[in-house]
Amino acid sequence: MTEKVWAIIDDIRTLNCELVARTARDGIQMVVDNFDKIECLCLDNDLGEVVEGYDVLCHLMYMNKVPDKVQLVTSNPVAQNKMGKLLQSQGYKTIDNRNFTLFHE
């Protein structure tokens, strides 16, 4: 069994994650390349570029590459709500609008 790791896409924070990407493009590639071993994806919205975390999340959903656990680490409440609604529309559950889990039936 492969050891699971935490990954983060954030232009500033690391949060003790084993995999770190600072840009949207690098983040998408990191998730695609390591999808099977990512336990949780920590995702910021404001990445310091035109493409935001919300766009990354949409792209990963289109590719069916969103891990079962996602933690929103953005300090932007509007973006957090928007990203949370997107995750919930895909079956993810949350109790705090920050930590989301996809339960398989």
Image (tube, grey):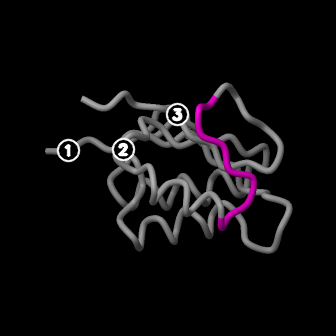
For the residues labelled 1 and 2, the Cα–Cα distance comes to: 9 Å
Circle number at residue 104:
1
For the residues labelled 1 and 3, the Cα–Cα distance comes to: 20 Å
Circle number at residue 68:
2
Q: Is residue 75 left or right of residue 64?
A: right
> Residue drawn 75% across and 53% down?
22
For the residues labelled 2 and 3, the Cα–Cα distance comes to: 12 Å
Q: Alpha-carbon neighbours of circle 1 within 10 Å: few (<14), some, or many (≥20)?
A: few
Q: Are marks 1 and 2 in contact (CB under 8 Å)?
A: yes
**Label 1 amino acid?**
His
Q: Is residue 46 magenta?
A: no
User: Magenta span covers which residues?
Assistant: 17-25
Is the N terminus in the top left, top right, bottom left or bottom right quadrant? top left
Q: Earlier in the sequence, mark 2 or mark 3?
A: 3
> Residue drawn 62% across and 31% down?
17
Circle number at residue 80:
none
**Label 2 amino acid?**
Asp
The residue singled out by tag 3 in the image is 6
